[in-house]
Each structure stands twice: as C-alpha cells, then as structure tokens.
Image (tube, rainbow, N blue to C red):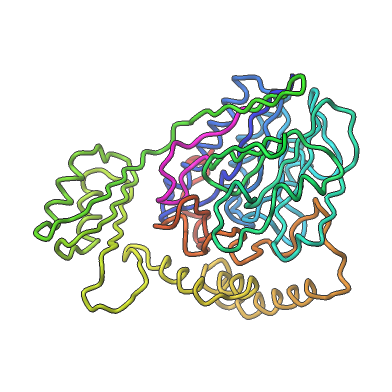
Amino acid sequence: MTRVLHTADTHLGYRQYHSPERRRDFLDAFRAVIEDAIEDDVDAVVHAGDLFHDRRPGLIDILGALDALEPLADADIPFLAVVGNHEAKRDAQWLDLFERLSVATRLGDDPVTVGETAFYGLDFVPRGQREQLSYEFAPHDADHAVLVSHGLFEPLVPDYGNVEWDAEAVLNDATVGFDAMLLGDEHAATTAELDGTWVTYCGSTERTSASERDERGYNLVSFEGGDVRIGRRGIDTRPFVFVDLELAESEGPARVRERLSEHDLEGAVVQVTLTGDGESIPPARIESHATEAGALVARVTDRRDVSTGESLPEASFADPDDAVRERLRELGLSAGARDLDETIRSGTVADSNVADETERYVEELLEDADPASDPASASAPASDPDGDGDGDARPAADAADGEGASGDPTEPERSASDDGQASMGEYL
C-alpha cells in the first residue's frame, strides 16, 4: 500500500489584509500539515502547487518553507511537488532550489515511484499554451499511477467563464493510464470519479478569501490492490467570524454591533456582509468596533443599493484595491496587460526601476509570442506564469482580502516592504 498526504495552495508569504500575523498564519498552517505527515508516517507528501503566494517570495518566506520541510526530509518522507500559477517564474523555479537542497522532488514526465505508486507532474500551464501539450509521460512498472497538477479542471470546478482545462481530455490523451489526479488551484475541497479515475482537489490550507468558509485541511490518499481511497482531515487555523445581516428599514449600526456581540472576536478575522433596507453604515465604524473587541482584522461589505441610483462597483471601503481589480477584470485586459498593471501597482519594483522592468517584460512577451518558439511540454514551467492575468480562471477581482465568489484564488498583493515587517524569529 502507498499512503500519501495531498496538500496544495499553501500560499506562503501572503500578507493577507496587509497583516504580518496573517502572513505567519499561512506558514503555521503549512507546518501543521508537515507535522501531521511526520506523525502519521505517510509514504510521501504531495503538494499540487502554489507553495508560495508570489513568484518572488521574500527571503523570510523561503527560509520558513525550508524550516518546515527539513524535518520531513529528516524523517525520510519525500516531498513531491509541481509549480503553481502564483509561484511560476520564466526561468528556474523555487522548487528547483529546494530539490537541489534535497528537501523536495519536482514531478514531471518521468515517474517518481514511492512504494507501489508512480507519481507524475504537470505544472500550471497558461490557457493559451494548453493546446500544444502532448501529455506524453514515460512508462512505469508500478501498480498505480498518479498525475499531480495545478489548474482549474472541468468538470470539478464551476465554469467562471474561462475554465477550459478538461480533466477527461487530459486523461484520454495521456500516454499513461492514471488511477488518480491530485490537483491544486481550487481552494474548495472536491472529489469526483471520471471513467474510473479519481480526481480530487484538497483545497487550501488557510482561508485566502472571505468566501472560503469551510474548514481548511488536506487529503489522505491510499493506493492498494487497484483501489484508491481518499480521506479528508481538517487543521486548526485562525478563526474567521462571518456575520451576514439583512437590516430592516429601521436598523443600523446598533443592530450590527448586537450581532457581533454574539461571537467571540478575540484574535479572529471578522467578515460582515450587509443587505436589506437599513440605515447607512460607515464600514470604518463597524470595523473599529470589532477590532476594539479583540478582532485581528475586520472587513465590512455593504451589498445594498447605492442611494444615488448609479451603478457602482461593489467594494469594501477598507480595501479599495478590490474595486480596482474588479474594474480591470471588466476591461478584459490581456494576460500581459494585467501582469504589467501588477508590476506597476504592486510596489514590488522601485519607482525608479519601473520603466526598465516594464521594458524587460514586454521584450519577454514578444519572445514568448514568437511563432518559432518551441511548444510547451507537459511538465515545462509556464512561460507566462499568470496565464489569463491572475493564472486562475476565476475573476481577478476575487482577491484574497476580499468579498469574491466561492472558491476564489488570491490575487497577488505585494509590497516592497513586506520582507521587513517582522524579525526572522517571528517566523522560524
């Protein structure tokens, strides 16, 4: 029997809500998964992409990942992984570095056999390059075969408008017959059987969006005698308090405070969503009330009609970046345009270097568009890591801070000062 822990979408380094504490939460959740793997003595940990939130993670996040992975290597439990859309680079991947340090194995076209099972990898590939994939994998002589990949695959993921990676087509075209596909990118855990192959998303290990209300966790997958068994286990993460309140015409801030008093807000992330016909409520007043009651972070989304009657973007005033992302999505910009916008707005590039960075990126886009370029192979790193702008088929406005649709991924949200927010000791 081969028994593995399947995890993904750990998004290390994500400073959600601009909070250093939330950044630590993502690392703590990953550590909890690794500790469980060691305690359960699984045969391997399989990570299906987006180990990091950013393709340029801070040194403190890289060291935090290494600190979590070294005990796994000491326990002789392999860490098998693929590259996700958030962390993909145009050159060598962080996963390659970890492989050189003997704490990880990057999966690809050739099988990596653990016990009775052969594991293959398919990195995230931008939507425009998927038709070029041949899905040619080297043969194996194990009892079972597994494909690990990162992306939004039909029919498991709802169609957000541009989900076009078909799991059944991949399975039919692959030169190897797979008993299971272990996937990442969809942050909600879900499992289905497609013509005898089990296909499963394990979900994210921390909540990256206000819509992710279910318990966070991972999958335990076993392969024995032709059978595949998939179990689910939750992990303890920072509490989120969700208050959905429909206000009657005469109700206002006092009613919201009353509802908040019904919850233990100490150390929690509080998400308040308002509907109904009640009084106008400044979000900042409610957010201040919640933080004074002990909440780590509070966000208010007022979904009621604007009194002017004009159609305005729905956004929390506490996080206007969400409104910007929503507008960018509506503009239907290309992947390159969205990536350039990210470069200019995110603060990851010093103002004095923005022009040079923009010129360099445009040159890379032109090179990628050269019809003489070699087609992408099944396991090759994505040459455009963001694919359709955010790398996920879900709307770009569904940011990790925010009030997006169910299962939303995180939109990269970086600050040049992130790396200096806390001392090394706070993370390691």
Q: Quadrant of residue 382?
A: bottom right
Residue, x 71% and y 59% (percent of image)?
89
The x, y position of residue 349, in whole percent, is 58, 70
In this rendering, the answer to whether 268 lies above or below 85 is above
Image quarter (top left, top right, bottom left or bottom right) of the N terminus: top right
Magenta part, dominant SS? loop
Is residue 67 shown left or right of residue 134? left
Residue 60 visible in the current orientation: no
For the residue pair 48 and 192, the one nearer the viewer reads as 192
- Displayed quadrant of residue 224: top right
* Residue 411 percent across, percent down from the top left: 52, 60
Residue 173: percent from left, percent from top? 82, 49
Q: Is residue 131 magenta?
A: no
Residue at the far left in the pictured view? 250
Q: In the rendered view, would you say 404 is above or below 227?
A: below
At 69% across and 52% down in the image, what residue appears?
166
Query: Could one spot residue 243 in this view of the protein?
Result: yes
Q: In which quarter of the image is residue 103?
A: top right
Q: Does the magenta stretch include residue 207?
A: yes
- Left or right of residue 189: residue 96: right
Residue drawn at x 60%, y 46% as measured from the top left: 156
Looking at the image, residue 406 sits to the left or right of residue 72; the answer is: left
Could you say where residue 422 lies in the image, as x and y percent from the top left? Answer: 46, 49
Q: Quadrant of the C terminus?
A: top right
Magenta part of the chain: 205-220
Q: Which residue shows up at 46% across the image and 45% down it?
A: 207
